[in-house]
């Protein structure tokens, strides 16, 4: 029997997925949680061998939760479900050593088959997304540039970014210019869109 922890912040979707999984004779939803921070405690409490994680959850997202399971509960394999299948996000998920990565609009048959393959120790990746990730390559941004751009995403201005990153205002401006140039963007807002679309910004 495959014991599953299901993490999804949308209650209706979580209940529907749990009902689908519980109909299968070889699957049991041992726990349902609505946030990434609840995943590890649920896995440790239930002894689940599989965690199905929504990628977008409040606080700790699905990829971060998968990385925690990798380190703290390595016997539990992870399957990420995403509503926005961005190539860079898949690369982040693979870095976290997830066993599966599927779009939320996969058919019930595809989802159940994916869950079984993950439980059997195999890897399941949506083929179209895998090809897109292969073609797009790694992020051209350094960790520091990602940090600066993340502050832009939070709505911080140049002075605020400088204060929170221990950089001078001039250095922050230089970073933002470099980011825009590297991404071939029109401005910092366009750079933010490009980074998000490619999954280079969590």
Image (cartoon, rainbow, N blue to C red):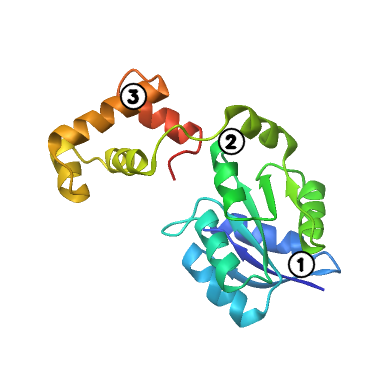
Q: Residue at x 68, y 41 (%)?
A: 105
Residue furthest bottom in the image: 45
Q: Distance between the residues labelled 1 and 3?
A: 48 Å
Q: Name the residue under label 3.
A: 180
Q: How far apart are marks 1 and 2 (CA)?
A: 31 Å
Q: At numbered mark 1, what does the secondary structure look like: helix, strand or loop?
A: helix
Q: Which of marks 3 and 2 is in front?
A: 3
Sequence-earlier tag: 1 or 2: 1
Mark 3 is surrounded, within 10 Å at the Cα level, by few (under 14), some (14 to 19) or many (20 or more) other residues, namely many
Q: Distance between the residues labelled 3 and 2?
A: 20 Å
Residue 158 in which image quadrant: top left
How far across and how far down the image is residue 15, in percent?
A: 63, 62
Sequence-earlier tag: 3 or 2: 2
How far across and how far down the image is residue 98, in percent?
A: 64, 55
How far across and how far down the image is residue 101, in percent?
A: 67, 48
Q: Mark 2 points at which residue?
A: 87
Q: Which residue is drawn at 79% across and 61% down?
A: 121
Q: Which of marks 1 and 3 is in front?
A: 3
> Where's the C terminus, which quadrant?
top left
Q: Which residue is drawn at 25% across and 40% down?
A: 155
Mark 1 is surrounded, within 10 Å at the Cα level, by few (under 14), some (14 to 19) or many (20 or more) other residues, namely some
Sequence-earlier tag: 1 or 3: 1
Q: Which mark is residue 22?
A: 1
> Which of the two residues, 107 or 118, is positioned nearer the viewer here?
118
Left or right, 84 with respect to 58, comes to right
Q: Residue at x 81, y 64 (%)?
A: 23
Mark 2 is surrounded, within 10 Å at the Cα level, by few (under 14), some (14 to 19) or many (20 or more) other residues, namely many
Q: At numbered mark 3, what does the secondary structure look like: helix, strand or loop?
A: helix
């Amino acid at each position: 029997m495959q014991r599953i922890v299901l993490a999804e912040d949308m209650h209706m979707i979580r209940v529907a997925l749990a009902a689908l999984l519980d109909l299968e004779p070889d699957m049991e939803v041992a726990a349902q949680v609505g946030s990434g921070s609840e995943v590890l405690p649920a896995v440790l409490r239930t002894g689940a061998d599989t965690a199905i994680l929504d990628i977008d959850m409040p606080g700790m997202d699905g990829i971060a939760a998968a990385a925690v399971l990798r380190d703290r509960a390595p016997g539990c394999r992870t399957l990420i479900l995403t509503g926005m299948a961005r190539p860079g996000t898949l690369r982040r998920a693979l870095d976290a050593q997830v066993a599966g990565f599927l779009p939320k609009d996969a058919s019930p048959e595809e989802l159940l088959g994916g869950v079984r393959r993950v439980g059997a120790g195999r890897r399941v990746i949506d083929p179209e997304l895998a090809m897109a990730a292969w073609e797009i390559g790694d992020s051209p941004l350094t960790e520091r540039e990602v940090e600066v751009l993340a502050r832009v995403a939070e709505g911080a201005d140049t002075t605020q970014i400088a204060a929170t990153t221990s950089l001078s205002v001039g250095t922050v401006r230089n970073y933002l210019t470099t980011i825009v140039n590297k991404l071939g963007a029109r401005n910092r807002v366009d750079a933010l869109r490009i980074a998000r679309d490619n999954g280079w910004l969590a």
